[in-house]
Image (cartoon, rainbow, N blue to C red):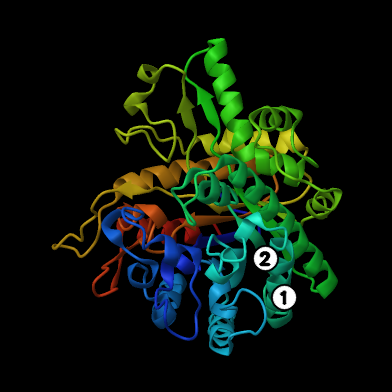
């Protein structure tokens, strides 16, 4: 089908996963730099400064590939620690100049920057002051956001305050993301505070007077009970409440559910909250960004689940994949919160856990499994638009194989293959497919 005029076809990325060059240009440390030093924190032992894609030096190469794909928008993030090495205070001129150059070059090429303020890389200097556990985090983030709006607000059409705020809980409550704590009460407080900080950034944007859009990105991993037993249905509800609904209820529904407040109070993990926190997150946003990869099968009996893995993109045998679920999940969110604001599919893609090699005969990675996934996901987007759902854009994750956080280099989502020794980018079969899909959909 032909997509609506002005529809944004793009790819998404993040600064921490692509820039590299972590000790160049006055950049400060992030919590991931410190976390990566812990034994076994990152598969393969890779560190952010040496494991990304050298985009800090090679942005012109990335831009050339973006132009070749035919995208009209690029979702990227600002590294807070690159522009404010201390987290607050004086700006780093080399860092701010880098992003200005990136944004200007994108705009010259007709590619609209969609800019995320926080994609998981909190400055380590702020972590040493309490990080997201501190109520001062609202003030820190608002200061950072305000400075970015003043610098770039007149040229950036779309801003995202937070990408997948559940990452904060994974870092403070579960331990497998930075900063690596395993205290559920801390995790709940940190994720409450990061949502408050998001609202403070929205407030700063409104005060700036800029006329672009600002929104929040929350990922949805809908739990699917594997049987109709009361136990499995209850488990699916509980995991939905603890995970994505914690954020969407606060952002789109006005506040946390009674279910989650009662549960946390009984556990002794309830957050400290103030009325001001909810005033901030109830400020209107211009769009909702949904990251969707898959649904998650759950059961109280492990034998009911192939591979017995109740989280992540796929079960352990790699056979559980549900790109079509995008259709039902987005309808669910729109209906649940009676959404009147536009929606962006802000991330969607296929992660391959294992090697992907460049074919010597034709110089291409033959990732037909990724094409199959993307074709089904984009068919779901077409159906949603035909249903009258106000979807304004689709961003594929991601431009090139990068540093996938705790998974190191093992999980690959890129349309382009990255050689992590030479940093050469090579188009995969899926890149040509996406290029042609975009061209045929305009």
Residue 111 image point, x, y percent: 56, 73
Q: Residue at x 52, y 25 (%)?
A: 224
Instruction: Note whether residue 197 is visible.
Output: yes
Pointer 2: what residue? 159
Pointer 1: what residue? 149
Question: Mark 2 and 1 residues: CB-CB less than 8 Å, in contact?
Answer: yes
Relative to 398, say whether 59 is above or below.
below
- Looking at the rendered structure, the secondary structure element under dot 2 is strand
**Quadrant assignment for the C terminus:** bottom right
Residue nearer the viewer, 37 or 434: 37
- Looking at the rendered structure, the secondary structure element under dot 1 is helix
User: Dividing the picture into quarters, in which one does residue 336 lie?
Assistant: top right
Q: Residue at x 24, y 61 (%)?
A: 364
Classify mark 1: residues with Cα within 10 Å, few (<14), some (14-19) or many (20+). Answer: many
Residue nearer the viewer, 291 or 144: 144
Mark closest to the chain's N terminus, 2 or 1: 1
In the picture, measured across the screen, residue 288 lies left or right of residue 20, that is right
């Amino acid at each position: 089908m032909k997509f609506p005029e002005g529809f944004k076809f793009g790819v998404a990325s993040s600064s921490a996963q692509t820039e590299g060059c972590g000790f160049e240009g006055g950049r400060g440390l992030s919590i991931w730099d410190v976390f990566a030093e812990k034994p076994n924190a990152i598969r393969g032992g890779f560190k952010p400064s040496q494991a990304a894609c050298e985009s800090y030096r090679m942005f012109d190469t990335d831009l050339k590939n973006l132009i070749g794909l035919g995208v009209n928008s690029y979702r990227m993030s600002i590294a807070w620690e690159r522009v404010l090495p201390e987290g607050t205070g004086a700006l780093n001129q080399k860092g701010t100049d880098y992003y200005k150059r990136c944004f200007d070059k994108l705009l010259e090429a007709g590619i609209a920057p969609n800019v995320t303020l926080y994609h998981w890389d909190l400055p380590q200097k702020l972590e040493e002051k309490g990080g997201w556990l501190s109520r001062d985090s609202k003030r820190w983030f608002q200061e950072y956001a305000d400075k970015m709006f003043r610098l770039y607000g007149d040229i950036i059409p779309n801003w995202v305050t937070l990408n997948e705020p559940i990452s904060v809980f994974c870092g403070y409550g579960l331990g497998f993301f930075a900063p690596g704590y395993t205290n559920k009460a801390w995790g709940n407080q940190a994720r409450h505070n990061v949502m408050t900080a998001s609202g403070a950034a929205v407030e700063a944007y409104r005060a700036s007077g800029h006329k672009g859009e600002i929104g929040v990105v929350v990922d949805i991993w809908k739990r699917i009970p594997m049987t109709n037993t009361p136990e499995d249905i209850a488990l699916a509800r509980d995991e939905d409440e603890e995970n994505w609904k914690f954020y969407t209820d606060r952002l789109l529904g006005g506040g946390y559910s009674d279910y989650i407040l009662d549960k946390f109070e009984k556990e002794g993990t309830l957050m400290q909250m103030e009325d001001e926190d909810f005033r901030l997150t109830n400020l209107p946003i211009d769009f909702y960004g949904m990251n969707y990869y898959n649904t998650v099968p759950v059961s109280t009996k492990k034998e009911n689940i192939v591979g017995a893995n109740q989280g992540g993109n796929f079960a352990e045998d790699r056979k559980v994949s549900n790109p079509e679920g995008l259709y039902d999940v987005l309808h669910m969110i729109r209906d649940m919160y009676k959404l009147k604001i536009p929606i962006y599919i802000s991330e969607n893609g296929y992660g391959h856990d294992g090697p992907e090699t460049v074919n010597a005969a034709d110089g291409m990675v033959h990732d037909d499994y990724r094409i199959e996934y993307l074709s089904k996901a984009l068919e779901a987007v077409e159906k949603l638009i035909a249903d009258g759902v106000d979807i304004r854009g689709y961003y594929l994750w991601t431009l090139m194989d990068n540093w996938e956080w705790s998974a190191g280099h093992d999980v690959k989502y890129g349309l382009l293959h990255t050689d992590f020794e030479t940093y050469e980018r090579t188009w995969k079969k899926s890149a040509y497919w996406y290029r042609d899909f975009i061209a045929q959909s305009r």
